[in-house]
Image: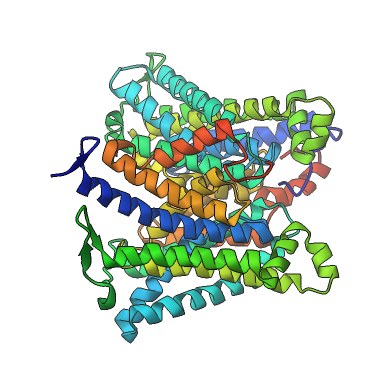
Amino acid sequence: MMTLFGIPTAALFGQLLLGLINGAFYAMLSLGLALIFGLLNIINFSHGAQYMMGAFIAWLSLTYLGANYWVALAVAPVVVAVFGIILERTMLSRLYKLDHLYGLLLTFGLALIIEGFFRQLYGISGMPYAVPKELAGGWNLGFMYLPIYRAWVVVASLLLCLGTWLLIEKTKLGAYLRAATENPALVQAFGINVPVMITLTYGFGVALAAFAGVLAAPIYSVNPLMGSNLIITVFAVVVIGGMGSIMGSVLTGFMLGLLEGLTKVIYPEAASTVIFMVMVIVLLIKPAGLFGKGA
Amino acid sequence: MTSHQMTSAARPAPSRQAIFIGILLVLALAAPFATYPVFLMKGLCFALFAAAFNLLLGYVGLLSFGHAMFFGWSAYITAHAAKEWGLTPEIAVLLGALCAAALGAVVGWLAIRRQGIYFAMITLALAQLMYFVALQAPFTHGEDGIQGVPRGRLFGLIDLSDTLNMYYFVLGVFVLALFFLHRVINSPFGQVLKAIRDNEPRAISLGYQVERYKLIAFVISAGLAGLAGSVKSLVFQLASLADVHWHASGEVVLMTLLGGVGTIFGPTAGAYLVVTIQNFFASAGSWVTIIQGSIFVVCVLAFRAGIVGVFVPFLKKRGIDA
């Protein structure tokens, strides 16, 4: 058996791949959080619940409607985005003039409602969701076995993050968005409908979460609690990266996922806490976060 | 964060305030003869927890989303000290509260480096770290928790396994802690805290070392949250993961919000209401979570003053500080 630093390479690369996949989810979720925070100035605590909804929509549409994975991948983000837009219009938009903490509290309450609702209906044991047949199987790379679906998750999330970055940095719509993040009143004065932009941004942010949820369905079991534990880790990722830059959040997400995978090989006891430890170190050295500006 | 301000200029006439407090005290003393003492004690523990949390949210404007770590970890320490080391309850409780205050000093020192929403996220993440530590540390017994914690004899004399004795001990701790909080809030130190809440840049420009004030407030809050957790571990003779979980952190926010942020008796009212809801729906599965979430939404959207907060202007006119 090949070894590297005294660790079997198959185990090492296997864990690094798992880390990369976790990192992909951290990246997609922190990207959505950063987008929403940029324009709405709230932390969307229900992000994890919306990610869980994405996975559940995939499972429900397969079980009851026979819709396959690809349909779910297209439909779930739209459904969750519409749901998010309704929430934003009816509730969140009433809070913009108040302390930003109220937004956090409201979305926390919404997360409890959504999670409790799914728990009441489906329990907490979790439902399996089969890997789509186009992506079943795997490749033997010589040093490790690579399941095709996992490779797909990494590629899809990278494409999604890149696409979002291009949308925000390189298009006219993105330029409006960045301008509105800096100074909404001025952008509105130029005749751009900022409230509509805010609504659409929230919808887009939660759609990203739902997309991640569908991607996650075949890897983790579809479980009402799948989002709430993940989202706290994502908060730590966001504190580490700072929410100032899109690429920063993506990079931080992937890096921390890899670090977590590596920790699982070297010192498994610390795997669940390593990201929080990194957060402590970053707070000590660079309180604004690796890519953050100011406090 | 608060929708109403507490001005020190309108200091209430002591007589009416004294009558108001006196009525509450008589009610509290007589309560165990009218309803279940264990329910009352649970409510008092959470009321103290919420009052400690309220010091930060209501008077400094800091939203800690990780207060369960102080509550839950002090419960573990008190339970361990009472069960494995055989310490008397008052020493075990003090030890738990002191450890929580020490943990609060570290957490506060880290978290006050960032403001607003980041502060909330950092405290939540650190609480999750402490949750995983509790899950893995051998002395906490993982999923089982520390069970069968002896209540012992207070000062080696009073047998706390008697429910009524235990109730009056918990009530005593609660009243002393609430009195202490009241003094902190109405001291010059408390005035500076409120100044920081209302306008931090101005407080800085006046020469106050804002970070130091925030840290001291955080340590007091953590220590009192720990006191609540310690007492709770004796009441239920159990320290478990549920008390360090983020759900507990969310519950204390809910109690404070529902009762009235920045009021003295609001957290107590909120705690009793939430505990009642928990008991009432205990067998109804996830409905507790759904109801708690709904209360959050309603409070944030339409009821930001909270239950006691609604009555504050009415009582204030009559010289009562609630």
- Rendered residue at 35%/51% (across/down): A19
In front of the other: B23 or A256: A256
- Rendered residue at 35%/35% (across/down): B134
- Left or right: residue A11 compared with residue B183: left
In front of the other: A91 or B252: A91
Q: Position of residue B288 (x, y in %)?
A: 44, 58
- Rendered residue at 39%/70% (across/down): A214
Q: Position of residue A282 (x, y in %)?
A: 53, 36
Count the marks: how many?
A: 0
Query: Which residue extends farthest left?
Result: A1
Q: Position of residue B74 (x, y in %)?
A: 43, 29
In front of the other: B139 or A142: A142
- Left or right: residue A13 compared with residue A165: left
- Left or right: residue B233 compared with residue A1: right
Query: Which residue extends farthest top?
Result: B156
The picture quadrant where one finds residue B186 is top right
Query: Which residue extends farthest front?
Result: A142
Quadrant containing the C terminus of chain B in the rendered view: top right
Res B70 visible: yes
